[in-house]
Structure formats: structure tokens, C-alpha cells
Amino acid sequence: MATTTLTGPRPAPRPGPLTGFTIGVTAARRRDELTALLTRRGAQVVEAPVLRIMPLADDLALRRATEACLTAPLDYVVATTGVGWRGWMSAAEGWGRGAALAEACRRAVVVTRGPKATGAVRASGLGEGFSPGSEATDELLTWLLARPLAGRRIAVQEHGVRLDEFAAALRERGAEVVSVPVYRWAPPDDPAPVRRLVEQTVRRQVHALAFTSAPAVTAFIETAAADGLREPLLDALRTDVLPFCVGALCARPFAELGLPAEFPERGRLGSLVRLLAETLPRRGRRELTLGTQVLTLQGNAVLIDGGSRLLSPRGAAVLRALAERPGHVLSRAELLRTAWPDAEADEHAVEAAVGRLRAALGPHGQLIRTVPKRGYRLAAG
């Protein structure tokens, strides 16, 4: 049976705080949740998992570390991540050593790095003896080093990367340290999306990047370096593309490079998304009164008549350049330098982009006026 499709003008989508902004999501774990939170607020998302978690439930190193923890009483146990702690307890249970490991931890002082690790420890029937106000591993180390450690046995649950310096500092004070590698970070199965996101960042085709782990930050920069784009990437992050991190620990690699990175006080995905929704519009939003029309430029979108119209990155760049001085004529060459700074294009590309921009603006496209033999201007009234 044939179906009839009714056509007609589609209502402009109701704008959200992130409408018009394109955000690169680098997380592997909880990527779907983060993407949903961003798109619900109007963002366009580019997904490019930089790393993946490799669980080590069947790894000999994890089993040996677990057995080492049970050879003699433990004095301290360091829980660094919730997913790592749960994975360790689950693996031990599968080997028939769950009860013994839980008892060994119960007799020790368990210290936890942040609320997620604390929640996992409590869910396993244990309690924490100390948890710092921040989620920094350094605070755990400072607390431990303030105690007499000579002859003490300490189990350190690692979180995707080795904590060699942490363990070395404890051993220098005379402690015996058992490092517990529950999972490791590994490169993604398909590196192509990450490389594309690096290129989009360099070309300023995204407005922000969202990171949920420090290793992901490092891996993203290393991907750029492997393609000869490290310095262009850092320049983009220093100027036009904002990096956002889930917490201070995640942002540390940026701080070490002298790059600004935004992060919320509480290391939660919801807090990260709220920070994005507050910061990007404040930084990339501009209101224009053109005669009787009020247009708001936000990222790659125009907000008008209670709705939004998405533009191409080039179209948005052209409109933003014209909006800098409404009524002022910009030549095609000037627009070319503004909207195509790193691409080979001629003035015909400007004409085509203006045509598409007018079409995207619908009835408001008439606000972009052609000035014969001179260029274009945005109608000021």
C-alpha cells in the first residue's frame, strides 16, 4: 500500500543552551550517557573514543597480585576507582578468593580516591578509613606518608595506568607495596575517528572537547603528534577550541602544558555537562538587533523567532564576520581570509557559501545584502 508523505514547512527546533555547538566526546566508557546529556541540550556531538578499557579478570598479573595480598596481613588498601574496585572484587570472587580478599581488606585501613571509589568500597560491604576532599591521588599519598610505614604492607589498586611514582614514594618510607592492575587503557579498535577529531579540532570545526580521564588527554595529544599535528592542535586548544575535563585530575595534563582547561568542582558527568552548557553560550553567543529582527548567533546556529537554524561551519564563520560590523561591507577576499584561513579556496567559494547561508536563514536571508563589485554586508536597519 502506498504511503503519502505530507510536506510543508518544518517548525524550527526549539533551541537548547548548546544548540549550534559541536562537541567532541573522547570517552569510551559511559560515552552513550555523555552523548545523550549533550544532545538533549542541543549540541551536535562527534564521538571519538580515544582509549578503551581492557579488563584483566583472566590476567595472570591480577591473580598474582591478589594472591600476594593474601600471603600476609595488609595494613592499608588504596582504592582509586569504582570500576577498578568492582572489577577486582568480581575477579577474586570468580577465582574463589572473594571472601578471603574481603576479609583482608576489612582488617586493613581502606583509603579511597573520591566518591565513586568510596561508593564501590561501601557496596562491597567495607568502609573507608580516609577519603580526601578532592579526587587527587596526591592527597592519598600525602595522607599515607604522614603515617609510620616501615614494615607496613600496602595494596594499591591501579586505574588504567601504572602508579610507579606513588608506589616508589611508599617504598622509600619502608613499606611493602603490592600493585594491583585491575584494568589497563588500550588504543581504540578503530583509530580513524580519533584522527578525524584531531583534524576537526585543528580546523576549528568543533567548539569544545570533553575528556573524562587524564590518559585520554595524553593519548589524544599523542595521536596528533603521530600525524605531525601536535603544535597546530595545541594552538587550537589555546585559542578557539575549549577543552573540558570531568575533574582536576583529568585536567592535569593540560595544566602541565600550560593550557587552560575547564572542569567542574564535582567530578560528575552531569556537572561536566552543566559547565559546558553555562560556558559555551557565554563565550560564543552574540545578539544582534537588525531593524525589527533580533538574531542570536550561537556557535553554528542562528536563534530567531523562538527557534534555531543550523548553519555550516563556513556559513557561521561568514555570518559572524559580517555581524562584527553590521552595515559595513566586507569584500569577498576579506571573507575568504576569515572563513577559509587554512584551506585553498577562491572567491567563488564565498559566493556559494553566502548562497547556502541565505537559504539556511530562510526568509531572514534577505538580511545579507550584496553590494555590487564590493562584497556583502549585514543589513543594519
Image (cartoon, grey):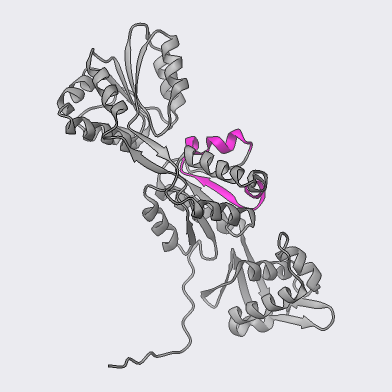
- Name above or below for residue 94 compared with residue 39: above
* Quadrant in the picture for residue 346: bottom right
Q: Is 238 in the magenta?
A: yes
Q: Residue at x 43, y 25 (%)?
A: 163
Q: Is 291 in the magenta?
A: no
* Quadrant in the picture for residue 352: bottom right
Position of 39 compared to 304: left or right? left
Q: Residue at x 53, y 35 (%)?
A: 252
So how many labels did they put on this image? 0
Say whether residue 193 is visible: yes
Q: Position of residue 28 (x, y in %)?
A: 40, 48
Q: Position of residue 291 (x, y in %)?
A: 69, 80
Between 137 and 156, the residue placed more toward the observer is: 156
Position of 340 compared to 294: left or right? right
Q: What span is colored magenta in the figure? A: 236-258
Q: Position of residue 91 (x, y in %)?
A: 23, 33
- Name above or below for residue 331 compared with residue 162: below
Q: Position of residue 224 (x, y in %)?
A: 59, 46
Say whether residue 330 is visible: no
Position of 249 compared to 232: left or right? left
